Image (tube, rainbow, N blue to C red):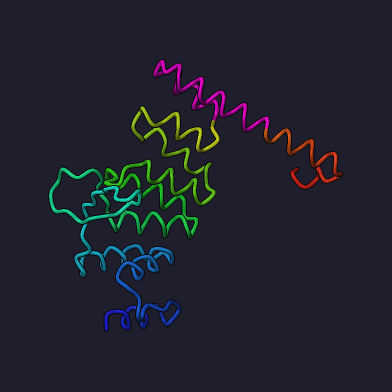
Amino acid sequence: MYQQQLEAEADGKFKFFGCSVNETIRICIMNGLSKKADKIKSDFKVPDKRYVRYSFLNSQLFSQKVHHSNTSMVSIRFWYTKLYALTESRDFEALEAFSRSKRSPIGYEAFVRHLVEKGHANEAVNYVAKCDPPRRADLYVDCGEWRMAGRECKERNDKAKLEYATIVFIHIKFANLMVYHFLGSCGRRHLIQ
């Protein structure tokens, strides 16, 4: 009934009927209905915290719900849903505003990882400075920001990580150079420009 009411309010532009609560929230966020998404979250008491402990069994990752606060990872369903929806709709201004609305319970590394995974490394760089200092150099490398990674290593006086980042950088540049020369020898260098 609630979904039918949402469809009527949206003049039938969006289909909500038969969707899960999370999917309904995602559709609202993707279509600029953030206040509706927040209302659905509160009306349906979408839990803020869902505690997840990861354990390895037969070298496969299994997830178990636990109900105490000393878990290894806290997952916030609404934050992930909103992160994924805003990324999918490429609304990076709203994503930035959302990240500043309050302290991220999923951490900012989740923002970086998801944005890089979806091909938005330039946007991901904005969240690296909010991540834990020991992880920043690696995250800058993931974003392709080699100078920032080097600067971070130098500030933390982490020579080993600086050396590693340098080797990775040289490896990637060498691999790209090899591809460039190979395509040039085939007369197809224009494909990568």
Q: Position of residue 161 (x, y in %)?
A: 45, 23
Q: Position of residue 155 (x, y in %)?
A: 42, 18
Residue drawn at x 45%, y 28% as measured from the top left: 137
Residue 78 falls left or right of residue 110: left
**Front-lying residue, 168 or 41:** 168
Q: Residue furthest left?
A: 68
Count numbered badges in the picture. Answer: 0
Specify the segment rendered in magenta. 146-174
**Front-lying residue, 94 or 90:** 90
Q: Does 136 sit above or below residue 7?
A: above
Image quarter hosting the C terminus? top right
Residue 29 falls left or right of residue 146: left
Whether 169 is among the magenta residues is: yes
Q: Position of residue 130 (x, y in %)?
A: 36, 35
Residue 124 falls left or right of residue 172: left
Residue drawn at x 43%, y 64% as measured from the top left: 30
